[in-house]
Image (cartoon, rainbow, N blue to C red):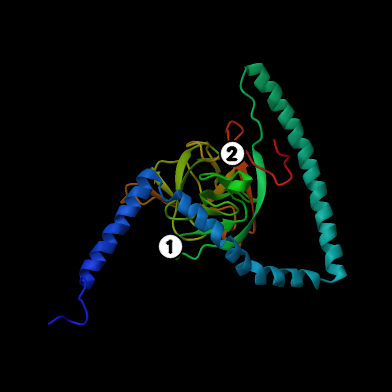
Amino acid sequence: MKTLFVRGPSLLSRLVLALACSFLLMFIDHRLQAMQPVRLFLNSLVTPVQYLAILPEQILDNFSDSIKTQEQLAEENEQLRQQLLKQQGQLQQFRLLANENKRLRELLGSEQRVPNRRMVAEVIAVASEPFSQQLVINKGTLSGVYEGQAVLDNRGIIGQVQDVGSNTARVLLISDQSHAIPLRSERNDIRVLAQGTGEIGRLQLMFVPHSSELKEGDLLLSSGLGGVYPEGYPVAKIRKINRDESLPFAQVQADPVSALDRVRNVLLLWQNDDERQPIYEDQPDG
């Protein structure tokens, strides 16, 4: 007698099969980048959803800005004027130093440094993964953004591009546990390696010997090693040094110079010797 319901594979067999397929897909994607077009398509697909998600916040921000009194606006305008005046004075000094540096490099026969190309982007979402610290910005491949690109804000380096869609990109912050960046001390040029701790405002310096001349308060700049980040941009300040001789290395904690939990606008950098260059919206075709 035939049964009404045919019994299929057991739940354990289905679980094993699903896990095997998952590991196979991850291996193929890791080795051959076979899923890159799929990720690009999905990133483009969720872009409207991301814009809709931040729409209420933008409406509230615009409303709060609109109810500012005329007195507050006048005060802010005066502060901005004073700040602009100070920055213009600093700019004049920087131009003088740049010209002097150019002449010295010409005398020494050294290659001149050309400023990197840049583009401003806006943060439209914060990644919701509990063990990953990432941002989503409103620039993608259509703007020339690429994986591994350096990302800054008005204070210093905040991370690098990890995934790119056509109109959006995902930025991995320097505080993420999977991120590391080579740095040097501004005071004495000691090279160190900073790794994220998983805390939004904390970095840890790796493999620092007890005899190191680093001090609390030292400013750490990007060293340019590795080719990801350009040299000389601020990254972090040393907050605490623990020279416990019972440990193989000194325990050094540093705080990012940027407020990573309050970033709203970022700056994308393109190396001048890189074939990839920014694509601006008003750039003419051809």
Q: In percent of the image, x 30 and y 53: which residue is there? A: 24
Residue 234: name its quadrant. top right
Q: Mark 2 packing: few (<14 Cα in 10 Å), some, or many (20+)?
A: some
The N terminus, quarter of image:
bottom left
Residue 80 sits above or below residue 225 on the image? below
Q: CA distance from mark 1 to mark 2?
A: 30 Å
Q: Residue furthest front?
A: 1
Q: Is residue 93 left or right of residue 240?
A: right
The amino acid type found where label 2 is placed reads Gly
Q: Is residue 236 left or right of residue 243?
A: right
Q: Disc 2 marks which residue?
A: 232
**Secondary structure under the numbered disc 1 in the rendered image:** loop
Q: Is residue 29 left or right of residue 99?
A: left
Residue 141 shows in this picture: yes
Residue 222 sits above or below residue 82 on the image? above
**Secondary structure under the numbered disc 2 in the rendered image:** loop
* Residue 110: image location, x then y, percent: 61, 21
The amino acid type found where label 1 is placed reads Phe
Q: Disc 1 marks which residue?
A: 131
Residue nearest the observer in this picture, 84 or 226: 226
Callout 1–callout 2 Cβ contact below 8 Å: no
Q: In percent of the image, x 81 and y 61: which residue is there? A: 76
Residue 186 sits above or below residue 173 on the image? above
Q: Mark 1 packing: few (<14 Cα in 10 Å), some, or many (20+)?
A: few
Q: In percent of the image, x 58 and y 62: which residue is there? A: 125
Residue 240 shows in this picture: no
Q: In percent of the image, x 80 and y 49: which residue is there? A: 84
- Point out the tag, 1 or 2, that comes first from the N-terminus: 1
Residue 202: assigned label? none
Residue 87: name its quadrant. top right
